[in-house]
Image: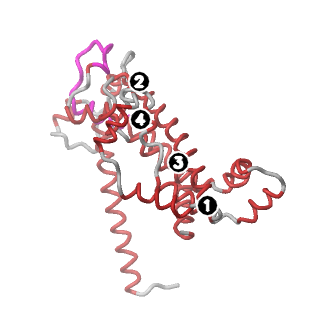
């Protein structure tokens, strides 16, 4: 079908806007990547204006990832927090959403109001800190897993999806003698993979990118996540000496270390996201239509 002049202008303007937005997103990261692999002499020679380096160097990465560097431990802490946190968060979110999706649940509306109120009103930073301190969770490995282990917003997404599954499937399984856990595990969850992938990705990004909770609740660098290391490198323009105890050499220029650290921290999310993007889009669209 041939487009009218107005429609053609609208399509062209869309392409222009989307192209500009893409450049705004891609160019800064490309600059970070190029600076991280450019020798400092060339960086200084061009006054930092580098988009296509003429020479290549891994000096900054070698320094950050040198044998004995505690940055490996901080990366391990982040992976542990992310894997454990996402698993716990999905378990709590799925089970609560499944229960609240049952229309015959006594007090269902009152419970939903309670969950919605947590999205509007929070305890605050100081009361939360005091609570965590009284529970003896300060500076522990588990505190960064527990503090973000539930989101009412994500629960509502899962609940909306569960409500769209035909109730006859659960009823027929119950007639055959299946327990609620069996129904959830063998019937509901296999049909809910798009929603689970959506919520899982939301939790994954939150856990992976979190540094503020680590800044509040963790003081031991051996328990710090890699995001806190990155924040320290960028904010103070220096690398914590505790994280490079075995480096044994003078550090390279700070700007290169900062850029290399950004790439090291951001790379896993950039690799994982394309594989779950289709599930994320499908889950969000289903939730929006049925909500």
Q: Is residue 188 magenta?
A: no
Q: Secondary structure at mark 4?
A: helix
Residue lying at the far right of the rendered structure: 176
Cα distance between the residues tagged 4 and 3: 17 Å
Q: Nearer the viewer, mark 4 or mark 3?
A: 4
What SS does tag 1 mark? loop
Q: Which label number is shown at residue 144?
A: 4
Residue matched to label 2:
72
Q: Earlier in the sequence, mark 4 or mark 3?
A: 4
- Depth check, mark 2 against mark 1: the one in front is 1
Q: Residue at x 19, y 40 (%)?
A: 48
x%, y% of residue 175? 82, 58
| Residue marked by disc 1 | 106
Q: CA distance from mark 4 to mark 1?
A: 34 Å
Write the residue at 34% across / 74% down: 13
Question: Which region shows up in magenta?
Answer: 242-264
Left or right of residue 195: residue 79: left
User: How many marks do you count on the picture?
Assistant: 4
């Amino acid at each position: 079908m041939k487009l009218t002049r107005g429609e053609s202008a609208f399509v062209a303007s869309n392409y222009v806007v989307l192209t500009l937005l893409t450049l705004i997103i891609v160019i800064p990261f490309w600059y970070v990547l190029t600076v991280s692999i450019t020798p400092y002499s060339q960086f200084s020679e061009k006054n930092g204006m580098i988009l296509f380096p003429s020479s290549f160097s891994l000096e900054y990465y070698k320094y950050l990832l040198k044998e004995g560097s505690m940055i490996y431990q901080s990366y391990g802490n982040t992976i542990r927090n992310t894997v454990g946190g996402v698993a716990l968060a999905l378990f709590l979110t799925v089970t609560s959403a499944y229960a609240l999706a049952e229309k015959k649940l006594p007090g269902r509306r009152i419970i939903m109001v309670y969950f919605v109120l947590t999205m509007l009103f929070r305890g605050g930073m100081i009361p939360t800190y005091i609570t965590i301190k009284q529970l003896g969770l300060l500076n522990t490995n588990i505190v960064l897993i527990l503090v973000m282990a539930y989101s009412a917003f994500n629960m509502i997404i899962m609940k909306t999806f569960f409500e769209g599954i035909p109730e006859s499937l659960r009823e027929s399984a119950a007639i055959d003698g299946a327990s609620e856990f069996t129904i959830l595990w063998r019937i509901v969850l296999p049909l809910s993979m798009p929603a689970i992938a959506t919520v899982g990705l939301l939790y994954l990004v939150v856990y992976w990118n979190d540094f503020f909770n680590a800044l509040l609740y963790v003081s031991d660098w051996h328990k710090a996540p890699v995001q806190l290391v990155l924040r320290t490198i960028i904010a103070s323009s220096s690398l914590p000496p505790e994280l490079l105890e075995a480096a044994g050499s003078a550090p390279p220029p700070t700007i290169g270390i900062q850029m290399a650290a950004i790439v090291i921290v951001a790379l896993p999310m950039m690799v994982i996201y394309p594989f779950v993007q289709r599930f994320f889009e499908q889950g969000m669209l289903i939730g929006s239509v049925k909500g």
